[in-house]
Image (spheres, rainbow, N blue to C red):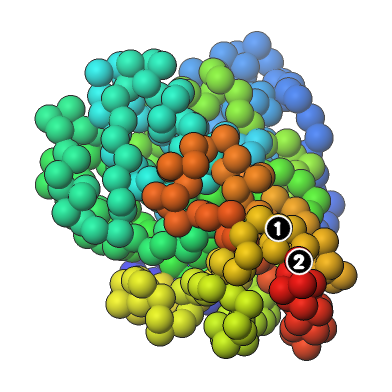
């Protein structure tokens, strides 16, 4: 036990045992409580439950025993006081942003974002009277220059989707603290195993649990983690009344995913590191961006805030769209998909999929060109993956 009474388990142990609550049957695996509501012994007990005088569950839109186990396990891993699990990663992002702001407030966000995240910042928030500014997040001076008297929130991904830029979370958090703002970090690409934003000063962390946490292409999910006071004062009522709740079945699947998360991510990173190094030497490849390489543009920040690289690689294939389409179509093992963090290796062409609704000018600002591909490495043998990439590059060169 630590001084504050918490178990000082390593992540591998935490992800198997933390948060588990067993029923009277003593089941080995976590139970799935597929219920909408709950019953009370008396009318007085129901009243006490709704008044908050008696702890327990009221309605599965608010909380559920299986979902609660997932939230507690993620809190133990992340080092957060409280969390709310959501139906998807975008539900988590939207909840974390919208519950923190009102009309007249201002949000600053890094411009390198997933397409849907950028839509929330650029389109949805302004429609509710929330001002927004996008900046090149890799330079802290840009964040400083974007601050206004009404700036209340900073939002960023790090590493970013899909070009794997890395932002100095500690520097952005220090700036936010100096003006009384909060920082929300989307930590999907790093996973909680390689980067811990709360320890770096961030106030809120969000995940698409659909990605590495599930990691096997089964279900959608998301989660928002922060201190208990912020959850109670900002997120709780938003979450309760808008209903972006996670289903108990999906929570159970995500609990199973967490048990193998360290093993999967370690293997995926090992493959990504080797493949990035090989691709960097290929004449068909114009650019390789990988957080584990010394030539990464933010290598100094990565050493400071990440304990490892990533399961993803960003590359630019020479020959533009025609070449990258030929490359994708020639792949045998690696599958074309807009998902990531899966046991299966996946490839995505952002310009025509995840970022197709972003303007061409905005894509150029983010470093997304017609030849840009995002590779998400899975659990296949790395030699098989390299052979698949080699024969696909031959097709790209001939295109």
Residue 123 in sight in this render: yes
Question: Of the residues under marks 2 and 1, which one precedes in the sequence?
Answer: 1
Q: Residue 233, which numbered label?
A: none
Tag 2 and tag 1, C-beta contact below 8 Å: yes
Quadrant holding the N terminus: bottom left
Q: Residue at x 58, y 60 (%)?
A: 372
Q: Nearer the viewer, residue 399 or 193?
A: 399
- Residues packed near mark 2 inside 10 Å, few (<14), some (14 to 19) or many (20 plus): few
Residue labelled with disc 1:
322
Residue 341 lies in quadrant: bottom right
Q: Nearer the viewer, residue 34 or 324?
A: 324
Q: Is residue 93 above or below residue 122?
A: below
Q: Residue at x 61, y 19 (%)?
A: 45
Q: Residue at x 62, y 17 (%)?
A: 46
- Give the image location of residue 267, x and y in percent: 68, 80
Q: Is residue 56 above or below residue 76?
A: above
Number of marks in the rendered image: 2
Quadrant holding the C terminus: bottom right
The residue positioned farthest toward the front in the image shown: 398
Q: Nearer the viewer, residue 77 or 272?
A: 272
Q: Which secondary structure, mark 1?
A: helix
Q: Which secondary structure, mark 2?
A: loop
- Give the image location of residue 200, x and y in percent: 31, 62
- Give the image location of residue 28, x and y in percent: 81, 62
Q: Residue at x 37, y 21 (%)?
A: 126
Is 163 situated left or right of 106 in this image?
A: right
Residue labelled with disc 2:
399
Q: Nearer the viewer, residue 364 or 275?
A: 364
- Residues packed near mark 1 inside 10 Å, few (<14), some (14 to 19) or many (20 plus): some
């Amino acid at each position: 036990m630590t001084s504050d009474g918490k178990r000082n388990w390593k992540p591998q142990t935490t992800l198997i045992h933390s948060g588990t609550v067993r029923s009277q049957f003593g089941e080995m695996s976590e139970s799935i409580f597929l219920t909408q509501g709950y019953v009370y012994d008396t009318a007085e007990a129901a009243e006490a439950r709704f008044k908050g005088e008696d702890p327990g569950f009221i309605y599965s839109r608010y909380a559920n025993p299986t979902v609660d186990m997932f939230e507690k396990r993620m809190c133990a891993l992340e080092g957060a006081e409280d969390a709310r699990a959501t139906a998807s990663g975008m539900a988590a992002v939207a909840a974390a942003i919208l519950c923190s702001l009102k009309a007249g407030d201002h949000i600053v966000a890094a411009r390198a974002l997933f397409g849907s995240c950028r839509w929330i910042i650029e389109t949805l928030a302004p429609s509710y009277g929330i001002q927004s500014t996008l900046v090149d997040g890799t330079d802290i001076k840009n964040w400083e220059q974007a601050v206004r008297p009404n700036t209340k929130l900073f939002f960023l991904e790090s590493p970013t989707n899909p070009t794997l830029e890395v932002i100095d979370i500690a520097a952005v958090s220090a700036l936010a603290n100096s003006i009384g703002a909060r920082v929300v970090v989307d930590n999907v690409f790093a996973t909680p195993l390689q980067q811990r934003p709360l320890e770096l000063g961030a106030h809120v962390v969000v995940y698409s649990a659909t990605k590495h946490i599930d990691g096997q292409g089964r279900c959608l999910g998301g989660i928002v983690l922060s201190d208990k006071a912020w959850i109670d004062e900002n997120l709780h009522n938003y979450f309760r009344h808008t209903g972006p709740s996670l289903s108990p079945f999906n929570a159970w699947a995500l609990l199973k995913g967490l048990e193998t998360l360290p093993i999967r991510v370690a293997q995926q990173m090992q493959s990504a590191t080797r493949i990035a190094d090989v691709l960097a030497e290929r004449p068909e490849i114009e650019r390789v961006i990988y957080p584990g390489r010394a030539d990464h543009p933010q290598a100094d920040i990565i050493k400071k805030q990440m304990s490892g690289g990533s399961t993803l690689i960003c590359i630019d294939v020479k020959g533009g769209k025609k070449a990258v389409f030929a490359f994708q179509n020639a792949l045998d093992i690696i599958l074309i998909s807009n998902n990531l963090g899966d046991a299966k290796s996946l490839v995505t062409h952002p310009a025509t999929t995840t970022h197709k609704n972003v303007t061409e000018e905005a894509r150029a600002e983010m470093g997304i060109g017609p030849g840009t591909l995002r590779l998400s490495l899975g659990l296949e043998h790395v030699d098989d993956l390299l052979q698949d990439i080699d024969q696909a590059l031959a097709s790209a060169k001939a295109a």
